[in-house]
Amino acid sequence: MKYTQVIPLLGAAALAIAGSAAAAEQTVRIGHVAPITGGIAHIGKDVENGVRMALDEQNAKNLVIGGNKIKFELLAEDDAGDPKQGATVAQKLVDAKVNGVIGHLNSGTTIPASRIYYEAGIPQISPAATNPKYTQQGYNTTFRVVANDSQLGGALGRYATDVLKAKNIAVIDDRTAYGQGLASEFVKGAKKQSPSVNIVSQQYTTDKATDFNAILTAIKGKKPDVIFFGGLDSVGGPMLRQMKQLGIDAKFIGGDAICTSEIVKLAGDALGDGHVYCAEAGGVVEANKKSLEKFKLTYKKKFDKEVQIYSPYSYDAANAMIAAMQQANSVEPAKYLPFLAKISYKGVSGTIAFDARGDIKNGALTIYTYKGGQRTLVTVTK
C-alpha cells in the first residue's frame, strides 16, 4: 500500500514539473534604434513608441513559441542621428544578444549599422530609412517597410513638373545620406518627366544649420517656381521662415522628414496654404484607412501624443518580425530569418512583404500639402 500510494504522487509531481517546464517563460529582446536626442528626437520617439506598442500588445497575448511562453523586451538605444554612435549602439545590441532589430531611423545610421547586424546574423527592419544603398549591399538580414528614395524622390520630381507645372527649380540638400539621395532622385524624376525643366540652382547646407540667408539670396535671383529641400523638418521650418522674410514665394517641396506636424510649429505663418508639399514613404489605400485610424486612436490613448510619421511602420515591422517567429516556431534569428524574407503580413499600413533585396513590395507614397496649419492629403501614388 505504501508504494502504490507514492507512485501516483510521484507521477502527479512529474506531470506538474513537466507542465511548468512547458510553460517556461523566455525573454525575447527586440532592439530599437533612433535619434531620441537632437532636432528630430520627436520623430525618433514616435518610432520607438510604435515598437513599444506592438510588443506590449504581443505580450498581452501570452504567445507560446518553441514550447516557451514568450515575453518580449524592448532594448531602445539612441543614435542621435550620428553614424558613429549608430555603429556603437548597434554593437551594443549585438552584445546584448537581441533577437531582432527595428531601426534605425536615418539612412546615414542605418547603412553602417546594417553590416554589424549582418555579421551577427540578426534581422534588421528599418521603418524609415529610404536610401536605396541600404538594401543594395547584398545582406540577407536587411529589410525596410517603406518605399525607397528612388521611388519617393522620383514621385516628387514628377509631381513638381506634371502637377505644379514647375519650369525652374532650385535644389537644396543637407549633405546627409538621406538629403543627398533624395535630392538626386528628385532631379532625376523631374528631368525624366519633363526634359526641358531647368535646375537653376543647387545649394547645400547641413542638418544643424540655422542661417540660410546666403543660399536663399543666391536662389532668389534665379526666380524658381519650386524649391526642393532634401533634409529634415528641424531645418526646413526655419528655412521657410527665412524664405518669407526674403520675399521668396516659390513652392517648397520636401520628403518624408518634413512631412510632420512639428513643421507647423517650426515654420509658423511661413507655412502658408498650399505652399508646402511633401511626400511620405508609405501610404494607405481605402481598404486600410479604418485600421490606421484605429491605430492612431490607440496610440493617442496610450502615449497622449499624436502620431508623427513612422510609428505605424515600426509597429507593423515589429509585428511582421514576430509573425515570422511564429511561423518558424522559433525566436532564433537564423531560424526565423527565412520566414521573414517570405512574410506576407497584413499590417495597419498595408501588406508587409519583401522583394529579393528586402525592399517593401508595391511601396506606396503619399503626397501632402498644408492648409490651415493642418497636413492635408493630396494623393496616394506608387
Image (spheres, grey):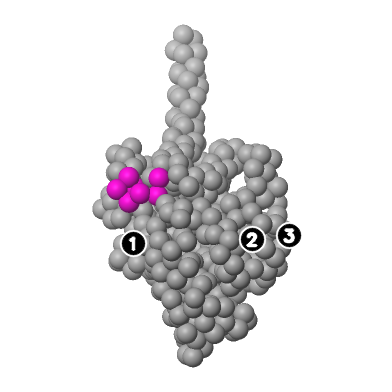
Instruction: Classify mark 3: helix, strand or loop.
Output: loop
The residue indicated by pointer 3 is 372
Residue 271: numbered disc: 2
Q: Residue at x 64, y 43 (%)?
A: 305
Q: Nearer the viewer, residue 40 or 104?
A: 40
Q: Does the magenta segment cover residue 85? A: yes
Q: Residue at x 45, y 71 (%)?
A: 218
- Is 262 located above or below residue 10 in the figure? below
In this picture, residue 374 sits left or right of residue 206:
right
- Could you classify mark 1 by the number of other residues whose Cα lies within 10 Å: few (under 14), some (14-19), or many (20 or more)? some
Q: Earlier in the sequence, mark 3 or mark 1?
A: 1
Residue 362: numbered disc: none
* Position in image of residue 102 (x %, y %): 44, 50
In this picture, residue 101 sits left or right of residue 44:
left
Tag 1: residue type? Asn
Q: Does the magenta segment cover residue 62? A: no
- Is 172 located above or below residue 71 in the figure? below
